[in-house]
Amino acid sequence: MTVADRAPPSPSPPAASRQRCAACGHELAETDPRQRCPNCTGLLEIRHPPPAATGMALRALLDARCGTRAGPFYSGVWRFRELVLPSAGDDVLSYPEGNTPLLARPSVAQWAGATTLLLKHEGHNPTGSFKDRGMTVGVTHARRVRATAVACASTGNTGASLAAYAALAGLPALVLVPKGRVALGKLTQLLAYGARTLVVPGDFDTCLDLALKASEQLGVYLLNSINPFRVEGQKTIVLELLQQLGWEPPDWILVPAGNLGNTAAFGKALREAREWGLIRRVPRLAAVQAEGAAPFALSFAEGFARRHRVEAHTVATAISIGNPASYDRAVTAIRETDGVVTAVSDAEILEAKAVVDASGVGCEPASAASVAGARQLINKGVIRRGDRLVAVLTGHILKDPDAITRYHSGTPPPPPHANPPIEIEARVAEIARVLSARG
Ligand SMILES: *Cc1c(COP(=O)(O)O)cnc(C)c1O
Ligand SMILES: [Zn+2]
């Protein structure tokens, strides 16, 4: 028994969660619908009352819910409800989501140069990305504050997820996307799930500015990742992978980083997991950006002396963000976990993706940044070969089919893992020729 194993005396009735400004400490009620601190416009964070059980008792409670096939714990988010939204009660709106696999694929580990590299595949969520974990909590909360419409700015995945959960809730959804910069699989989801899809000239950062103004002036409830309830849901990526590892933390968790909502959520999840005695040691976070959209990596290289803003350009559209909204919270996450931030090139991302795809797993381009980052950080000696790594794959392979076609049918010289289609005459001899050529 450790100190953390003893449950604190349970307050009665259980205290409500609060929203707290991360910058100035100002507190708001849990159901206050404002998106930023009224004092200083800082980002808000949810503070929950301590769970009734901690340490081994909390582990046992959470583990007993695994493998549930129906009911309130049949979700990889709501299984952790005491740590996500304890006051949700029966209000929960769930697909269900989460319960994503943690995969070992030797060919991927070998390419990265790691002894142990596991892939936490968030593309297995209902709409094909981790955004569903935040959105089930965000839309649950939107109903609690009696929102009449929900909105977000998106490079595609947030919008697809919002559209699906708004449809479940029976709420109208508005999605603002940057013109010409949304992958085909995501755009088609928006239309199919029934969101009002507004195509804006400009980049993601333009869309987010506009969505913020619209939410303040028109009263629609904004569900971008600055919304602290989204962050609560996304914490469960980390909680679930720790649980899958029997609460024995890896040495590193690698995550693709764009708007930095996930980086922030991972930091909060790890802080709380240690505080509530679920783990004793905190893994290090590695946030991986694309070179063409790396303002956070620039700040890290300067010891976070200042914030940067760039014009974002990368093949990995989900992380093509020049002015990350969750910057402050993400800085805290990197500092608290003794983490690192790095950037990888589009060529490295596409090569990593081709390796993940050819292993039979598959992911969208942004997701492969975590695997590309693993290889780069091992080569640089930041991560040791023998360290135990978990790389998060954030989205599904079918999100961006055009990126795949472009890579495999690419103009000469062919990229390292190109597998172009082969045209043949309708004769068996032609097939035999192809078979023998492959050796
Ligand atoms: C949203 C998203 C990201 C970036 O996550 P942030 O929280 O914005 O840093 C990375 N990959 C995919 C597939 C995404 O949908
Ligand atoms: Zn404040």
Image (tube, rainbow, N blue to C red):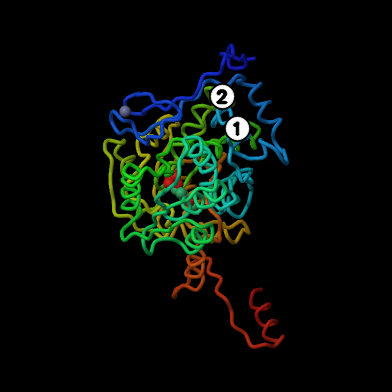
Vertically, is 6 above or below 137?
above
Horizontally, residue 150 falls left or right of residue 57, namely left
Residue at coordinates 42% horizontally, 57% vertically from top-left?
317
Horizontally, residue 18 falls left or right of residue 57, namely left
Q: Secondary structure at mark 1?
A: helix
Q: What is the spatial separation of the Cα atoms under label 1 and label 2, in whole angstroms?
A: 18 Å
Could you tell me which quadrant the N terminus lies in?
top right
* First in residue order: circle 1 vs circle 2: 1
Which residue has dot 1 on it? 80
Vertically, is 121 above or below 92?
below
Residue at coordinates 46% horizontally, 33% vertically from top-left?
267
Label 1 sits on what residue type?
Phe
Residue at coordinates 54% horizontally, 20% vertically from top-left?
50
CA neighbours of label 1 inside 10 A, class few (<14), some (14 to 19), many (20+): many
Which labelled disc corresponds to residue 280? 2
Residue at coordinates 45% horizontally, 25% vertically from top-left?
18
The answer, for residue 362, to whether it is visible in the render is yes
Locate residue 13, reporting x and y percent. 56, 16
Locate residue 3, reporting x and y percent. 58, 13
Label 2 sits on what residue type?
Arg
